[in-house]
Amino acid sequence: MGRAIARCATLTAGLFAAATAGGQTLPGDAYAADPVGIIADPCPPHPTPRTDAEWQARQRHMFTRDFGQLCRYAAENRMLRERPRVVFMGDSITEGWIGADPSLFTDGLVDRGIGGQTTPQMLVRFRQDVLALKPRAVHIMAGTNDLAGNTGAATFETVQGHIASMAELARAHGIKVILASIPPAIRFPWAPDKRPAPQIARLNAWVRSYAHANGFTYVDYHAAMALADGGMRPGLASDGVHPTPQGYAVMRPLALAAIAQALGR
């Protein structure tokens, strides 16, 4: 799981321009024959990518045919038999959480993270992966990949708007909202030109203010995990971004306290 998440994040940003240039496919592309248009089942099965070429084909398919990656959790959503207590919506930091700490995702806690995703992609799938599941609460942790530029350029206001739209949709559907800070990072391995610490601080300040102004629960992972320079504390991340089991061990009690606070309101 960790290797797949890291590979996905590394390839995503570099493939954006190629993926949007007419949606061409390469010879042998496993996705070339996939159906398009309005159909009953838009998610034909594919084998797990193993080579770089197969991962690149998967990423091209995502950008041109399934931008929000609605297919990722479609089958698992259909298999749910009970209303979740909490859905965790996020990117690779959320997706990797269940592998590092599977015991957390019991008693109605459901992981719906997808590695490499930005806030517009999460907003696309928010109805399917959150609203349709009718959880009591949603935990939203987003923004790392927007700062890295995984789906291109955006303003702070645009990213903030996507987060606000998810929160407002949840509230309109009677779902309690937990907004999480972006964990610390001073560099992104897949976007080495970025120096994200000041932007992370700025976005987190907005998330905190927005949560408080709207009566949402705010959970601050950044403060518990950061060094003075905005980087991750030693041992808490494998690459300065993605938490290790020790990192998730720091996050777990904060998440549980936030859930208790949100559901107790």
Image (spheres, grey):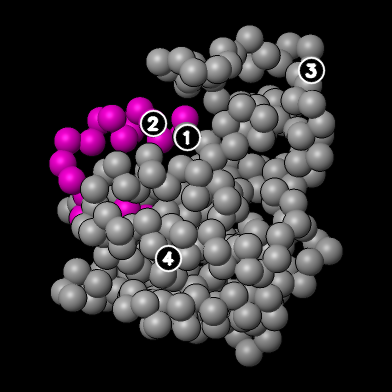
Q: Could you tell me residue 143's position as x and y percent?
A: 58, 63
Can residue 86 be found in the magenta stretch? yes
Q: CA distance from mark 1 to mark 4?
A: 26 Å
Marks 2/1 in contact by CB < 8 Å: the verdict is: yes
Residue that badge 3 annotates: 26
Front residue (pair 101, 64): 64
Amino acid at the residue labelled 1: Leu
Residue that badge 4 annotates: 248
Q: Would residue 239 be seen by someone viewing this image from the given angle?
A: no
Q: CA distance from mark 1 to mark 3?
A: 23 Å
Amino acid at the residue labelled 4: Tyr
Q: Residues within 10 Å of mark 2 (few under 14, many from 20)?
A: few
Q: CA distance from mark 2 to mark 1?
A: 6 Å
Quadrant in which the C terminus appears: bottom left
Disc 4 element: helix
Marks 1/4 in contact by CB < 8 Å: the verdict is: no
Residue 167 appears in which quarter of the rendering? bottom left
Amino acid at the residue labelled 3: Leu
Disc 2 element: helix
Q: CA distance from mark 4 to mark 3?
A: 39 Å
Amino acid at the residue labelled 2: Ala
* Residue for point 57% across, 51% down: 120
Residue that badge 2 annotates: 74
Q: Would residue 29 be seen by someone viewing this image from the given angle?
A: yes
First to last magenta residue range: 71-88
Task: Examine the rendered structure and indicate whether residue 47 appears above or below residue 105.
Answer: above
Q: CA distance from mark 2 to mark 4?
A: 26 Å
Residue 250 appears in which quarter of the rendering? bottom left
Q: Which of the two discs, 4 and 3, labels the residue nearer the N terminus?
A: 3
Q: Which of the two discs, 2 and 4, labels the residue nearer the N terminus?
A: 2
Residue that badge 1 annotates: 70
Q: Could you tell me residue 8's position as x and y percent?
A: 64, 42
